[in-house]
Image (spheres, helix red, strand yellow):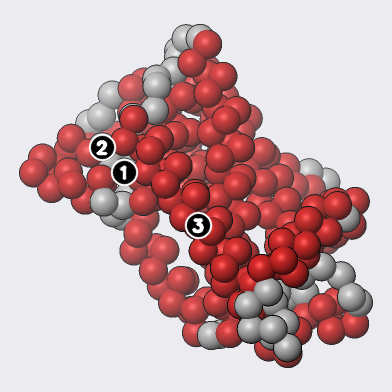
Amino acid sequence: MKTFDLAGAMSDIAKGFALWRVWWRLGLDDLMLRYSRTRLGPFWMTVSLAIYVGGLGLVWGTIFNIDLAKFFPYMAIGLIVWQFLSGTVGEAGQAFITSNGIIQEIPLPLSLHIDRQVLRMLITLFHTVPVAIAVTLFAGVDYTAVHLLVIPALIILAINCWWVTFLLAIVGLRYRDIGQAIGTFMPFMFFFTPILWKKEMLGRLGFIADINPFTHYLEILRQPFLGNLPPAESVWTVIVMTTAGLLATLIVFARTRHRIAFWV
């Protein structure tokens, strides 16, 4: 058995993408099962997020006497993107574990199970986009050509969702404590990510936002939604992390692909 099979890993990924009808159907079924026998179905995500964002914005603005017209869209879109980021990281470690029955019984590409989960996360994100649009309309944000940058930002986030899910799915399968560690880590990171606050509010401690990778993923989507160009440092940070993450994921998968079926 090869300990490092790069060609096999790349072939598995290519075959997984080619079977898009399978993971598309499985991903949709996962969502429909979660909301089975409900009237609104997945749109409950939109409703619950709208209530959460509206209530938090009202309370937060009142407590700190903040101009809601300016701060509310910043905070709301930050919460929407954070929900996607934290959901991706939080559920990534379970991708192979929850598919153990299929992995052991049906010879499908392993990457297909990653594609299935990524689809589910992206559908969740798109169900929250109407809230972001409503918030910008409420705040009177003028729509310009800059808003078109939302499209490449979403594509970049989708790519990062894929490699993060893939990498953490392998690590989480091998080391089952990873899921618990992530569950502890992510709420902590929420308060160190500029969602309910802005970098300039911290003064000399503003570097906390700069060294936080979640900040940069947040900004490449939030700023275009607000009609602003994303910061150059955030764009370059995300490009570097995306490239490094894809390479790391490919290397790890090439080394572990033949063991995954035994680990589940």
Task: Assign the C terminus to one quadrant of the image.
Answer: bottom right
| Residue 237 sits in quarter | top left
Q: Position of residue 227 (x, y in %)?
A: 44, 18
Residue that badge 2 annotates: 198
Say if residue 113 shows up in the picture: no
Residue that badge 3 annotates: 245
* Sequence-earlier tag: 3 or 2: 2
* Sequence-earlier tag: 3 or 1: 1
Asked if the residues shown at circle 3 and circle 2 are in contact, with their CB atoms under 8 angstroms apart, the answer is no
In this view, the residue in front, 209 or 243, is 243
Task: Tell me the CA gap for discs 1 and 2.
Answer: 5 Å
- Amino acid type at image mark 2: Lys
- The answer to whether residue 189 is left or right of residue 47 is left
Residue that badge 1 annotates: 194
| Mark 2 neighbour density, 10 Å: few (under 14) some (14–19) many (20 or more) | some
Position above or below: 131 against 140: below
- The answer to whether residue 172 is left or right of residue 73 is right
- The answer to whether residue 156 is left or right of residue 71 is right
Residue at (90%, 51%) from the top-left corner?
21
Identify the element where label 3 is drawn.
Answer: helix
- Amino acid type at image mark 1: Pro
| Residue 229 sits in quarter | top left
| Mark 3 neighbour density, 10 Å: few (under 14) some (14–19) many (20 or more) | some
Residue at (17%, 38%) from the top-left corner?
201
Say if residue 5 shows up in the picture: yes
In this view, the residue in front, 54 or 6, is 6
